[in-house]
Amino acid sequence: MANYTAADVKKLREQTGAGMMDCKKALEEAEGNLEKAIEIVRVKGLKGVAKRESRTTENGAVVSIIADDKTSGVLVELKCETDFVAKGEKFIEVADALAAHIAATSPADVAALMASEIEAGKTVQAFVDEANAVLGEKIVVDRFAKFDGAFVANYMHRTAADLPPQVGVLVELDKENAEVAKDVAQHIAAFAPKFLSRDEIPAEVVDNERRIAEETAREEGKPEAALPKIVEGRVTGFFKEQVLLDQPFAKDNKKTVQKVLEEAGVTLKRFARIRVGA
């Protein structure tokens, strides 16, 4: 006779993110003791970490921390295999802990982050491996951004009510303006610009766009004399799609984002946009 209930299985799943059968087996082995069952899930999970390395991680969450004085902020993406794990309390706890660690230590990149110590004698890599084991899925720290400046703000977007934020945006202004920061961050979340300004685009990227525009126009049979104007028009269209400052503003498409910032008397220094799996 089973020495645990369906409620015990549910609680173990919520605390560990492990599969139902794994939870049942762990509770059976632990003779119904929840704490022992958690340890069993963790130990059995550790044995399977290597096997999970080849799995894909298309789900997850974006989490963010903004300092109380609004002069710094962090955005981090933590990925997993299923949305079941992504919306679990344990997964979000891990993501929040990583964001707090990044805020405190400012690692140079993901490699430096994974090698740093999040606890005495424990690297971030070991910390993530433990989460991997407990949750029973491959867990990956994919990207992060940390800004320090005059004024830093964020915007977090949920694509589904039962999931954690899947899109996160971090912006840095040269002076405080919470309303403009929020509006621009929301715009970035929706329109996904790749560059802040035209100056950030590598010359070879612009040259390639110009070449494609010319070849396309020739293929369409456009008059030779009209080619220069057509090409420049299409390159300008490329800028409007890819460059934040050139984009028509989401709340008023008669103005560019650049114009909105100018009217507010602020400068956008940089931005980061992270969408889970993209």
Image (spheres, grey):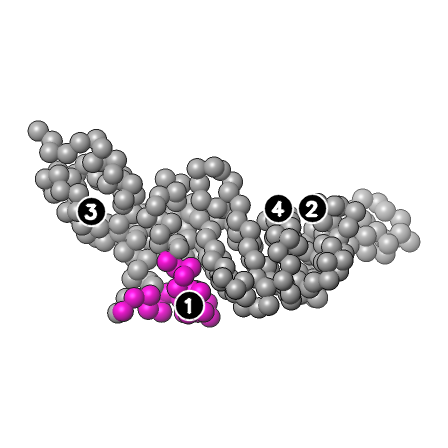
Q: Secondary structure at mark 3?
A: helix
The relative height of residue 127 versus residue 149 in the rendered view (above or below) is above
Residue 250 pos. (x, y %): 69, 46
Q: CA distance from mark 2 to mark 4?
A: 8 Å
Q: CA distance from mark 4 to mark 3?
A: 40 Å
Magenta segment's dominant SS is helix
Q: Secondary structure at mark 4?
A: helix
According to the picture, the residue beneath numbered tag 1 turns out to be 104
According to the picture, the residue beneath numbered tag 4 turns out to be 190
Outermost residue to the top: 1
Magenta-span inclusion, residue 111: yes
Q: Which of pointers 2 and 1 indicates the residue nearer the eye?
A: 1
Check whether the beta carbons of the residues at disc 2 and disc 1 lie within 8 A of each other.
no
Residue at 56% across, 58% down: 153
Q: CA distance from mark 2 to mark 1?
A: 34 Å
Check whether the beta carbons of the residues at disc 4 and disc 3 lie within 8 A of each other.
no
Residue 55 visible, this angle: no
Specify the amino acid type for callout 3: Ile
Question: Which region shows up in magenta?
Answer: 97-120
Q: Secondary structure at mark 1?
A: helix
Q: Secondary structure at mark 2?
A: loop
Residue at 42% across, 53% down: 78
Residue 197 location, quadrant:
bottom right
The relative height of residue 30 versus residue 147 in the rendered view (above or below) is above
